[in-house]
Amino acid sequence: MAQSAAPATGAPTTGAPAITPISAKAIAPWAVFVGILALVLVYFVGAEQGATALISGEGVHEWVHDGRHLLGFPCH
């Protein structure tokens, strides 16, 4: 009555799935995207509301205020 999940013929399996390597060509676009995203985030936390502000007002400053102190950027 028991049914086996293993194939009846062929080489015995170890139960571990085969790991396929990921090429650098497949990772490169994601690495570029994450790098640009990190640079934008560091800009908004560290430099926005300064001399090079892209957005006027205090909104961005208030949203990232604690992040500035956490990362060591001077704020006030």
Image: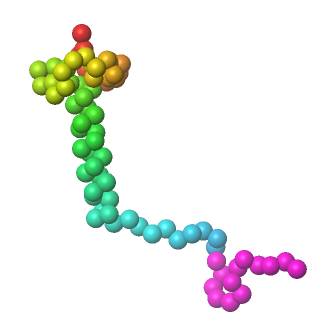
Of all residues shown, which one is farthest toward the left?
51
User: Left or right: 26 with respect to 7?
Assistant: left
Quarter in which the C terminus is drawn: top left
Q: Tell which residue pokes out farthest to the right in this image.
A: 1
The residue under the point 64% across, 73% down is 14
Q: Residue furthest top?
A: 76
Q: Residue at x 28, y 34 (%)?
A: 41
Q: Quadrant of residue 27?
A: bottom left
Q: Is residue 60 left or right of residue 13?
A: left
Q: Residue at x 31, y 54 (%)?
A: 30
**Compared with residue 35, is residue 28 higher up or lower down, i.e. above or below?**
below
Residue 47 visible to the viewer: no
> Which corner quadrant of the image does residue 60 belong to?
top left
Magenta-drawn stretch contains 5: yes
Give coordinates of residue 7: x percent, y percent.
69, 84
The percent coordinates of residue 25 (x first, y second) are 28, 65
How many badges with numbers are in the image?
0
Coloring scheme of the render?
rainbow
In the image, taking residue 59 as reference, residue 17 lies left or right, namely right
Who's the residue at 41% across and 67% down the image?
21
- Most foreground residue, 56 or 52: 56
Please give the range of residues in magenta: 1-13
Residue 47 included in the magenta stretch of the image:
no
Q: Is residue 21 above or below residue 31?
A: below
Res 34 visible: yes
Looking at the picture, how far across and down is residue 42, in whole percent? 25, 32
Give the quarter of the figure containing the N terminus.
bottom right
Task: State whether the magenta stretch is mostly helix, strand or loop.
Answer: loop
Q: Position of residue 73 (x, y in %)?
A: 25, 20
